[in-house]
Amino acid sequence: AITMSSSITIASLLSDPNYDHRICGMHSAVAQMIRNEHKEKTEQEEAQAYTIMATNLKRRLHSVYPDITVGVLVGSAFKSYYINAERDDLVIVNFLSDTLDIDSKQMTFVHKSFPPERLEKIFAILYKHNFMLA
């Protein structure tokens, strides 16, 4: 697994009072890509695919808010197998893969230091987006 910070877990983010979060379904193209990469590719190929997805996610958010630090985690409800995030990132998106698209979830954590309207706009920008597209 690619790991930049092992101290970030779903549990630690959910219990952190400095983050607000939303959970939505994952875009089906993203859910399928994560499942296929994890099953069929080498660890290095898998990490490359997730890095491309993370780059697309960051580009989407940075097109509106260029100053925001963004982290990305990919895995299951039990374990993240790709972590490209730091504990002080202002936005952290966790992709929780499952065997079914409908059960694959995207958890977005946004630091509460933002004004409420900016917080909501960040959630809206990232909501169920196809991050496979540049």
Image (cartoon, grey):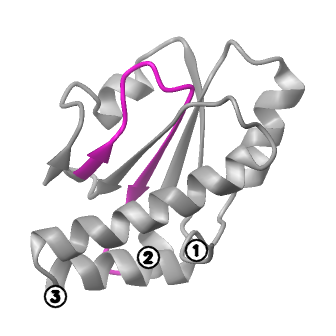
Location of residue 66 with respect to 15 vertically, above or below: below
Tell how many labels: 3
Location of residue 33 with respect to 90 vertically, above or below: below
Rendering coords of residue 45 (x, y %): 20, 76
Mark 3 → mark 2, Cα distance in angstroms: 14 Å
Along the polypeptide, which appears first: circle 3 or circle 2? 2
Mark 1 → mark 3, Cα distance in angstroms: 20 Å
Q: Amino acid at mark 1?
A: His
Q: Could you tell whether 33 is left or right of 120 in the image?
A: left
Dot 3: element: helix
Q: Magenta segment, which residues?
A: 82-100
The residue carrying pointer 2 sits among few (fewer than 14), some (14 to 19) or many (20 or more) residues within 10 Å by Cα, namely: many
Dot 2: element: helix
The residue carrying pointer 3 sits among few (fewer than 14), some (14 to 19) or many (20 or more) residues within 10 Å by Cα, namely: few
Front: mark 1 or 3? 3
Q: Is residue 20 magenta?
A: no
Which residue is the site of mark 2?
31
Q: Could you tell whether 64 is left or right of 76 in the image?
A: right
Rendering coords of residue 126 (x, y %): 68, 53
**Residue occupying image coordinates x 36% and y 28%:** 86
Q: Quadrant of residue 88?
A: top left
Rendering coords of residue 98 (x, y %): 32, 71
As drawn, the label of residue 40 is 3
Q: Amino acid at mark 2?
A: Ala
Which residue is the site of mark 1?
27
Mark 1 → mark 2, Cα distance in angstroms: 6 Å
Labelled pair 1, 2 in contact (Cβ < 8 Å): yes
Q: Amino acid at mark 3?
A: Glu
Labelled pair 1, 3 in contact (Cβ < 8 Å): no
Front: mark 3 or 2? 3
